[in-house]
Amino acid sequence: MQLDETQFETFVFGVGIGIGACVLAMAAVVRPSKASATQRAAKEPLLKTAVHREPLLSTEERLVARLSSQFNLSTDTLVRIQRQIIVDMKRGLAVDNGAIKMLPTHVTHRPKGTERGSYLALDLGGTNFRVCEVTFDGVGNASMLQKKFKIEDAVKTGDGEALFDFIAECVKIFLVENHGSQEGAKLVESRKWQLGFCFSFPVNQVSIDEGSLLVWTKGFTASNVVGVNVVKLLQDAFKRQNLNIAVSALVNDTTGTLISLAYTKPNTYAGVILGTGSNCAYVEKVANIEKLHGPREGLDEMLINMEWGGFDDAQVVIPRTKWDHALDSNTPTPGTWTFEQLISGMYLGEVVRLVCVDLAETGELFAKCKLSKEMRTIYAFDTAYMSAIESDHTHDLADTKSILEDKLHMPGSTLVDRRILRTICALVGTRSARLAACGVAAVVCKMNKLSEGCIVGMDGSLFELYPYYK
Ligand code: GLC
């Protein structure tokens, strides 16, 4: 290993968690906003297509207008949201219980591109759990081996120790596969590794390698983890597997996104995740982090994990629909992480499903079909269906028909049904993108980077795969 500890702490995860490759490709350059007419037009095609271009029946038109008025956010509202995010960011930097948590990451500098060595990295918090081995060559290049493991709901919501045992077993499988074939499992156990743990949940971090979980998000509820140092839980699980691994750093995925891009693009000042969950990390001046405990001498900047999913939990600035409230009341912690519910991939399909069920019950949608068991099942309408529906450019919305029939077991839809469904998807997806844009705008303004510009790293399945989202 040729990195010293500080170098390791400050950057290994960024590239290490495997997010790097995607992020590099997805860099969004934020510049002083003189968006061209073409750029502006490109932002609006969905609703125009759905709302204005189709030959609408008057009842359909009325329904679409009603739905649009509930989901569309006016420019004034978006500006108010952006301003309130900045107000809450400032408050969160001063106090521990702000509406946006603004968690210090203890990452105090960014990579130089000269770091070298091979490290393990884990990524827990999205749809899959990933184990990676990353090798840095010291001249700005990183190569990576990775393996994805599906985490069953029973593991996410069961016993905490069992969750960490599952993680350690996956690491062992990965090491045996990549280093054990000739050497045998014993050698895997004897080699000493340094590992970075990307744990994408709100953590009260007291140093780079210690932090306790504040609250589970994204459907995880494993017991006996809240309030506990997750690095110790992982380290203990490695011991139970006889693995000689030192957990050297704990980071959030947003922090990793920022750092990995900064490895090759030093002007990167923020990292945003738009995937199963949504959140942002950015570079803050240490002098502005009033609540920071411990010595500050010689420290200029620190990355802040905002945990913006908790913005507006008091529900004062963002207008919500009855379907948003219904979704929230069915989460493990109602009334919390409501901004994330309006934005992230875990929830968008469920909002669409709730609207559909409601309209079917009033006879305004799917009047000739029977609501299937799937359509009545919570979270059964995958956000990936929305992507496919919004990408459906066939004249009779045949792809949408296939999703309704094959995935949701709803035969018999009319073209009008399918057009309305596509409009609902467009409304919910566009609202998400606009709210995420408010967050990015707020962060860039807070950093005073609006005139000089900066790079914001973006990653996550929603950003990568959802049509028109960018
Ligand atoms: C959730 C988590 C946050 C994470 C985000 C994206 O909001 O609380 O820590 O960064 O999802 O994965």
Image (cartoon, rainbow, N blue to C red):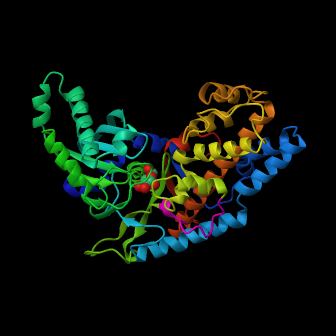
Residue 85 versus residue 237 in the image, above or below: below
- Residue that lies at the very extreme toward the right in this rendered image: 58
Magenta stretch: includes residue 304: no
**Residue 16: percent from the left, percent from the top?**
32, 44
Question: Which quadrant of the rendered structure holds the N terminus?
Answer: top left
Count of numbered circles in the view? 0
Magenta stretch, main secondary structure class: loop
- Residue that lies at the very extreme toward the top in this rendered image: 182
State the residue at coordinates (29%, 75%): 293
**Residue 219: percent from the left, percent from the top?**
44, 48
Q: Quadrant of residue 237?
A: top left
**Residue 59: percent from the left, percent from the top?**
87, 44
Pick the residue in front: 54 or 460: 54
Magenta stretch: includes residue 310: yes
Q: Which residues are magenta?
A: 308-320
Residue 265 versus residue 412 in the image, above or below: below
**Residue 13: percent from the left, percent from the top?**
32, 49
Pick the residue in front: 225 or 72: 225
